[in-house]
Image (cartoon, rainbow, N blue to C red):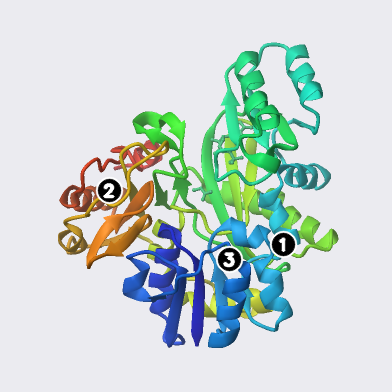
């Protein structure tokens, strides 16, 4: 089979690495890919948002399955076009991808399906939104731009002043363009966060193992929000009982509600949850693998991923064997460029990748990297996802940080406490 992977982050490198292990696969292309995917696949110079370029490439190369990594091409309708042309694709349709593309749509679906989530109000008028904030008692509020904003459209506000400032940036200054034409203002939830990902073909739901992301930039969850500074799997916070509850009260009603709205969801449904004292509540849906959650998850997946992706794309997920997992925990530490998540430099030569790759149980997934004159250089904010598996979580952590220590470029940094949160639930 010929597979095309769309995207260029750590998630896509992990997908390419995992897909390459399938005996069903003869050739893999990655558009546009990075220096890491170049080791597993053939990179093609087409942007993940160049829908026409991607469709033309898939047609010309007679691609058997296109796997779409990021949300932007999904929200733009890449899956629909490939599907219409009779090409197999893993990833939801444009209408189904609205679950991530519009927070207003997602909130409405959550409400009508009676899925636990934060209380919220929707506004399309800045003045009305401001009046609502002014009129409330002094509490913490979360202000969210409706549309896609590269993970930056959410502000957790400690007081009215911060909420008004967020509204100003989103609705008046239009920092995120049309994504800020509407906002969701919701109550701030307390608890611990977890990511639950499930494969679905619109009917059958196959939950994946649990994972937990670290969204804040610095140790102890301090600093600005990022795309994710590290992750681990499994998330021991999610007990089997809690998982049953999440499947029954969140995943099943969400998939059914999408079907009822004539937007059957095929692909990865990612529920970002807050585990509160009243139980799990949905913070957001994503319509794809998480990045960096995909890295530790895929490292633990033992089954061949390709038959599962094919079955999901063809609506016959109920026929596939259960996915088998390495019981050992895994962790991914993101190494970032100086300045991230603000402005950062590109083009720094990365050293020590071979030494790091030799650490037992370690795989270094590339994110923002590219090849320049035969050298691997930085090309993004999140540069590498150093991922390791170990008998215990502490062993996996030790291995990952051992490898991190061997990798260097000017300004490289990472969080040092990835997976420490899990310790309170473990006897390690
Ligand atoms: P989202 O893109 O909706 O997941 O929001 C990004 C991050 O903002 C989440 O991972 C949470 O850390 C935080 N967040 C979003 N909604 C809420 C909420 N209602 N209460 C507390 N934190 C939230
Ligand atoms: N790691 C969070 C996300 O992929 O959205």
Q: Secondary structure at mark 2?
A: helix
Residue visible at 58% across and 45% down in the picture: 272
The residues tagged by marks 1 and 2 sit, at their Cα atoms, a distance apart of: 38 Å
Closer to the eye: label 1 or 2 = 1
Residue 418, x across and y down, in percent = 34, 42
Residue 86: give its label: none
Label whose residue precedes the other's in the sequence (3 or 2): 3
Q: Is residue 253 left or right of residue 356?
A: right
Residue 173 vs residue 41: left or right? right
x 56%, y 56%: residue: 197
Relative to the observer, which residue lies in front, 108 or 411? 411
Mark 1 vs mark 3, CA separation in Å: 15 Å
Q: Which residue is mark 2?
A: 397
The answer to which quarter of the image holds residue 126 is top right
Q: Mark 3 against mark 2, which lies toward the viewer?
A: 3
222 versus 234 height, above or below: above
Q: Secondary structure at mark 1?
A: helix
Residue 357 locus on image (x, y percent):
21, 63
- How far across and down, in percent of the image, does residue 327 sit? 38, 61
Residue to which mark 1 is pinned: 94
Q: Secondary structure at mark 3?
A: loop
The first of marks 1 and 3 along the sequence is 3
Residue at image mark 3: 50
Q: Callout 1 environment at 10 Å: few (<14), some (14 to 19), or many (20+)? A: many
* Mark 3 vs mark 2, CA separation in Å: 38 Å
């Amino acid at each position: 089979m010929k597979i095309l992977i769309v995207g260029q982050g750590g998630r896509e490198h992990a997908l390419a690495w995992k897909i390459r292990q399938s005996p069903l696969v003869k050739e893999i292309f990655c558009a546009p890919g990075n220096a890491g995917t170049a080791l597993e696949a053939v990179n093609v110079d087409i942007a993940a948002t160049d829908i026409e370029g991607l469709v033309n490439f898939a047609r010309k190369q007679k691609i058997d399955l296109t796997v779409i990594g990021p949300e932007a091409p999904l929200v733009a309708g890449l899956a629909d076009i490939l599907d219409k042309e009779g090409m197999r694709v893993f990833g939801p349709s444009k209408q189904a991808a609205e679950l991530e593309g519009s927070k207003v749509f997602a909130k409405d679906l959550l409400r009508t399906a009676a899925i636990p989530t934060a209380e919220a109000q929707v506004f399309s008028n800045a003045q009305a939104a401001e009046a609502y904030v002014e009129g409330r008692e002094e509490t913490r509020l979360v202000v969210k731009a409706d549309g896609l904003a590269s993970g930056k459209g959410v502000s957790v506000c400690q007081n009215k002043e911060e909420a008004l400032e967020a509204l100003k940036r989103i609705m008046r200054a239009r920092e995120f363009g049309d994504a800020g034409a509407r906002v969701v203002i919701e109550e701030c939830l307390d608890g611990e966060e977890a990511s639950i990902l499930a494969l679905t073909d619109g009917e059958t739901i196959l939950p994946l193992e649990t994972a937990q992301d670290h969204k804040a930039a610095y140790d102890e969850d301090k600093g600005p929000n990022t795309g994710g500074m590290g992750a681990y799997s499994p998330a021991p916070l999610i007990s089997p009982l809690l998982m049953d509850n999440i499947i029954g009260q969140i995943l099943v009603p969400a998939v059914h509600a999408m079907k009822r709205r004539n937007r059957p969801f095929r692909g990865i449904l990612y529920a970002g949850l807050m585990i509160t004292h009243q139980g799990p509540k949905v913070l957001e849906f994503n319509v794809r693998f998480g990045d960096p959650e995909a890295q530790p998850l895929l490292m633990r997946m033992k089954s061949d991923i390709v038959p599962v992706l094919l079955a999901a794309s063809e609506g016959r997920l109920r026929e596939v064997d259960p996915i088998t997992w390495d019981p050992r925990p895994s962790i991914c530490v993101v190494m970032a460029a100086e300045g991230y998540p603000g402005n950062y430099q590109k083009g720094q030569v990365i050293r020590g990748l071979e030494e790091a790759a030799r650490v037992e149980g370690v795989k270094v997934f590339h994110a923002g990297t590219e090849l320049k004159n035969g050298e691997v250089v930085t090309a993004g904010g999140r540069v590498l996802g150093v991922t390791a598996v170990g008998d215990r979580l502490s062993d996996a952590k030790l291995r990952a940080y051992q490898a991190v220590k061997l990798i260097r470029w000017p300004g490289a940094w990472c969080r040092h406490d990835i997976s420490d949160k899990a310790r309170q639930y473990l006897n390690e």
